[in-house]
Image: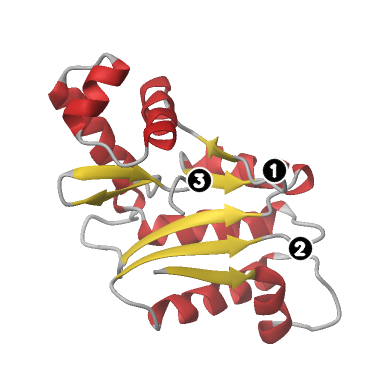
Amino acid sequence: MINHIDLSSVLRRTVCDLYSDLVTRPTGAAVRDGIEKQLAELGDRTLTVIDFSHVGLLDYSCADEIVAKLLMRYCADAAPRADDAPPRDAYFLFRGVNDSHLDAIETVLERHGLAIVAEGEDGAVTLVGTVDATERRTWEVLCRLGRVSPIELAREVGLDPVRAEETLDTLCRRRLAMRFDESYVAVGAMP
């Protein structure tokens, strides 16, 4: 099941219904809290579209609160302490991200070593943030091929099967791909 969260609606419900700009750290924290409350009502495994389409301005502090801190809560590799397991198996697609949002989002992602799948206004998906060349190539092949096994990916990318599976598992921990039984699919490549 794919869930949809419109950030401008969360902003209106949690902070103020007079504007569509995401500015100030308290605003970002309130919006992230609203998102997490909606996520708490969902199943143990979710794919959620976080929609920026109706957001005007996004400053760095809101990007940090909404994007980076949300990811750090759900990415297994980004948990502040080893015993801080993510509350659920949550994956995110950030939709409607435009050029005015990207500067703030890229800056906070790079600061924390995180990455997201962003869908632009034209519907194209891309990785934004910190990813190495193997992770990027693997994700791009997943997007092109759809659901694949580690063996299929290894042949396509030119990696040994063990390294291919390790890279796929890394993408899953970073919330850039999802595992289904013995195959994987890129976030953003799903219908």
Rate crowding at label 1 as few (under 14), some (14 to 19) or many (20 or more) other CA atoms within 10 Å: some
- Secondary structure type for disc 3: strand
Residue 78 vs residue 179, the one in the foreground? 179
**Location of residue 33 with respect to 137 vertically, above or below:** below
Residue 173 horizontal side relative to residue 144, left or right: left
Q: Give the x, y percent position of residue 180.
A: 23, 52
Q: Nearer the viewer, residue 154 or 102?
A: 154
The location of residue 145, given as percent across then percent down, is 37, 33
Mark seen at residue 55: 2
Q: Residue furthest top?
A: 158
Work out how far the residue at label 2 is from the one at label 3, CA to CA, in angstroms: 18 Å
Q: Residue at x 28, y 56 (%)?
A: 81
**What is the x, y in percent for residue 166?**
20, 32
Marks 3 and 1: CB-CB under 8 Å?
A: no
Is 159 placed above or below 41 here?
above
Horizontal placement of 22 versus 142: left or right? right
Residue under numbered circle 1: 102
Counting other residues with Cα less than 10 Å from the Cα at mark 3, is it few (<14), some (14-19), or many (20 or more)?
A: many
